[in-house]
Amino acid sequence: MESIAKQKIVEDLLPQKFGKPGKIWVGILLVFCALGLFAYIRQLTKGLAVTGMRDYVSWGIYISNFVFFVAISLVGSLITAVLRLSDVHWSTPLTRIAEIIAVSAITFASIIIIVDMGRPDRFYNLFIHGRLQSPIIWDVVVITTYFFVSILLLYFPLMPDLAILLKFKEKTGAGLHKLYTFLGSFWKNTNAQIHINEKAVNILSITIIPVAFSIHTVTSWLFATTYRPGWDSTNFGAYFISGAFLVGAGGVIVAMYIFRKAYQLENYITDSHFDKMGKILVLLALLYLYFNVNEFLVPAFKMKKSEEDHLLGLFTGEFAPVFWFAITTAMIIPILILVFKKGRRPLPAFIAGILVVIGSWFKRYLIVTPTLLHPFLPMHDVPASYRHYIPTWEEWSIALGSLAGAMLIITLFARIFPIIPIQETITETEQNETK
């Protein structure tokens, strides 16, 4: 019975070729990526003048996208590191999903920063003229470190699965077989290799937690060390980390539901997983709601003139529709859905996850733009267009192209590699049967 169960697990979790819906999905993502690339070529040719950014709003949806990507990448440390080190075994089917989301997100966080610079060659200046006093250098260091640690944390648990994939050349095809051979032919599944691999994964899991906290804290410092209303806050570090945990967990729930439906993984990503992740998401939404209240209550109580303009713009002014939409969709509605057991079933949890991800993107937009339009020194003698920020189609195209690119990486990874760890699933199944 054990061999039959093992064989069925391998067959269920082997990468599958795209069907018609999968090909359509990849085609749509490629169209958005191509549109983003075309818009970026226009920006390179004509300069940042093609964007809606001006003297005051020098950061727009590019930086909103950057903060969003950095935030959702935290899910790798939440699912893979925190739960693994806590000896939580139910999260095994979710670890690889979380890691590939983290890797794809941090990859495009790096790319979108270069896009925001206008000229890519300026990135070189960070290395030859960078100063340790600058939080931007700190951000470059922690993002680079987080990227490589995430890659290793994705690759090391994948090595036993590569050995399994090498046995199915007829199903995977000659091209992928060569890739698997290059990546994992040295894996012999010996006790020594298993021990070293497990030790390395534990070390990486411990390492990635402070690095993950650093990347989100340092990103918050890019704002908080700038003397502007709305950013001049000691709350920003914890505020960013709590929001990152929230959107990361929401992103995993969305991916869980899609992969479960697309690859018929109901036996591996069960209703219990949605129930547990739903509880985590409720906790994180309540935590982030607390930091939001804390973020706005103190300046609202003091009501300095510059802070007053900023807060009124958010609560009742130009940005009020987006603000209340973000608060409602990212926190209020997901809490109301997931606090009940029926709301933690797969479909309601998926809807809540979608709302969290969408609302969180707009929340990042609100972190960036309103503050820049409400400087401490009032605007005088500037064109009317400087008092508002409306992203151009080039900006929207590049932003959507980067989001599509991140999803394309996740999609292609699921086509090439098992999205659920095969060897870990087999091991846990055998351990459960012997109990």
Image (cartoon, rainbow, N blue to C red):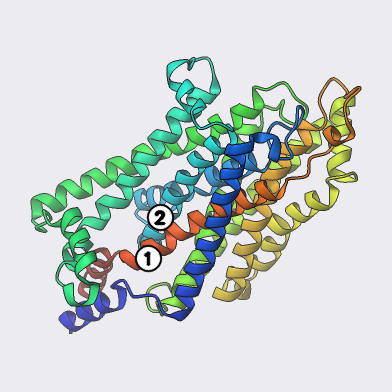
The quadrant in which residue 343 appears is bottom right
Give residue 49's position: percent from left, percent from top: 70, 35
Which amino acid lies under the numbered mark 1 shown in the image of this protein?
Ala
Observer-nearest of 412 and 240:
412
Asked whether residue 358 is in view, the answer is yes
Q: Residue at x 88, y 30 (%)?
A: 383
Observer-nearest of 274 and 170:
170
Give residue 73's position: percent from left, percent from top: 49, 47
Which structural element holds mark 1?
helix
In the image, is 207 to the left or to the right of 113?
left
Observer-nearest of 276 and 229:
229
Q: Residue at x 63, y 34 (%)?
A: 47
The numbered mark, 2 or 1, whose residue comes first in the sequence reads 2
Q: Where residue 227 is drawn, which disc sits there?
A: none
Observer-nearest of 27 and 282:
27
In the image, is 207 to the left or to the right of 157?
right
Give residue 78's position: percent from left, percent from top: 45, 49
Which amino acid lies under the numbered mark 2 shown in the image of this protein?
Ile
Circle 1 residues within 10 Å: few <14, some 14–19, many ≥20: many
Residues under labels 2 and 1: Cα distance? 9 Å
Decide: is 357 above or below 242.
Answer: below
* Figure quadrant of the C terminus: bottom left
Q: Which residue is mark 2?
A: 100
Asked whether residue 90 is in view, the answer is no
Q: Which residue is mark 1?
A: 414
Which structural element holds mark 2?
helix
Decide: is 403 above or below 57.
Answer: below
**Are dots 2 and 1 in contact, CB under 8 Å?**
yes
Give residue 80's position: percent from left, percent from top: 38, 52
Circle 2 residues within 10 Å: few <14, some 14–19, many ≥20: many
